[in-house]
Image (tube, grey):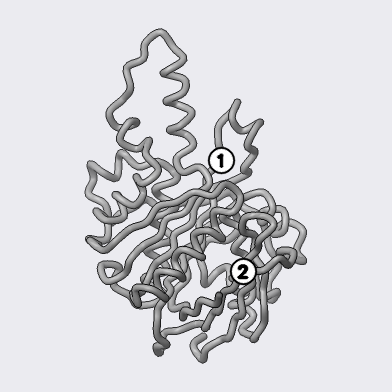
Amino acid sequence: MKLTAYLDGIGLLGPGLDNWPAARPILAGALPYEARPLAVPAPQSLPPAERRRTGLAIKVALAVGQEACANGQLDARQLAAVFSSSGADNDNCDALCKVLASDDRHISPTRFHNSVHNAPAGYWGIASGAMTPATVLCAHDGSFGAGLLEAMTQVAVDGWGTLLIAYDMPYPEPLHAKRPLPSAFGIALALMPERSARSLARIELSLSDAAPDALAEPELEALRRAIPTARGLPLLRAVARGMETRVVLDYLAPLSLAIRVEPENRG
């Protein structure tokens, strides 16, 4: 099985990786990586009432999705979307658990509204005006790979441009001790069925049993290993370097994803 798509836009947000243009020379090895606290922009595309209800997970998902569309000069209303996260809104999960464990079990309507795994997809529809299909999934540590496989399958089967939005955020204690994600992180990829003047690379995906690629920079490798969404960094590194290569990403053991990256002319 081989799936092919053209990568027209990238969104990236992580500690020390403020966006794709800033992160590209770091991933290419031209600049050193410097870890910094995550700065997440407010979702200005949402109406004020909805903006007040959003937590960190939704803010990260919207930020990278909008960046990928802007970088690729794409209309989000014309793209299907795949949202993938290992946990979604972990602050909200913690707050709901605390309320349910207390004597007063009245749940905030806003917390209940944001508790479902597809909440970011709903906010994305409000923010972008998209009424195209949206798929939401979770595959624990293989969530980025599962999202990429689903998005590329939709491109191949339906012939639609598809936006992958993968995101994660840390849990508060005591859940953090059991699931220690060090930071929020988001990656968005705008995948298209045909080459355009905006295409960054042609990517071809197949299943493999090869070991996933690691990153040479120790701090970036630590992020890759610790945050499920960051498992996509080797793919972004290949695009940043602009050379034809093959990368292997985590999926669901013992399977991995082998991806052939062929750069296009666009910088």
Res 203 quadrant in image:
bottom right
Q: Residue at x 22, y 61 (%)?
A: 131
Q: Position of residue 22 (x, y in %)?
A: 55, 69
Does residue 203 lie above or below 48 as drawn?
A: below
Q: Residues within 10 Å of mark 2 (few under 14, many from 20)?
A: some
| Residue type at tag 1 | Pro
Q: Residue at x 35, y 77 (%)?
A: 159
The N terminus, quarter of image: bottom right
Does the image show residue 26? Answer: no
Res 221 quadrant in image:
bottom right
| Residue type at tag 2 | Leu
Which mark, residue 170?
1
Q: Residues within 10 Å of mark 1 (few under 14, many from 20)?
A: many
Does residue 45 lie above or below 96 as drawn?
A: below
The residue indicated by pointer 2 is 207
Q: Kindly state the secondary structure of the residue where label 2 is placed.
A: strand
Q: Position of residue 38 (x, y in %)?
A: 54, 50
Marks 1 and 2, the one that precedes in the sequence: 1
Q: Position of residue 110 (x, y in %)?
A: 30, 32
Does 190 sit left or right of 170 as displayed? left
Does the image show residue 262? Answer: yes
Given residues 93 and 143, the one toward you in this image is 143
**What is the C-alpha distance between the residues marked 1 and 2?**
29 Å
Q: Kindly state the secondary structure of the residue where label 1 is placed.
A: loop
**Numbered disc total:** 2
Q: Residue at x 51, y 64 (%)?
A: 148
Does 213 sit left or right of 138 as displayed? right
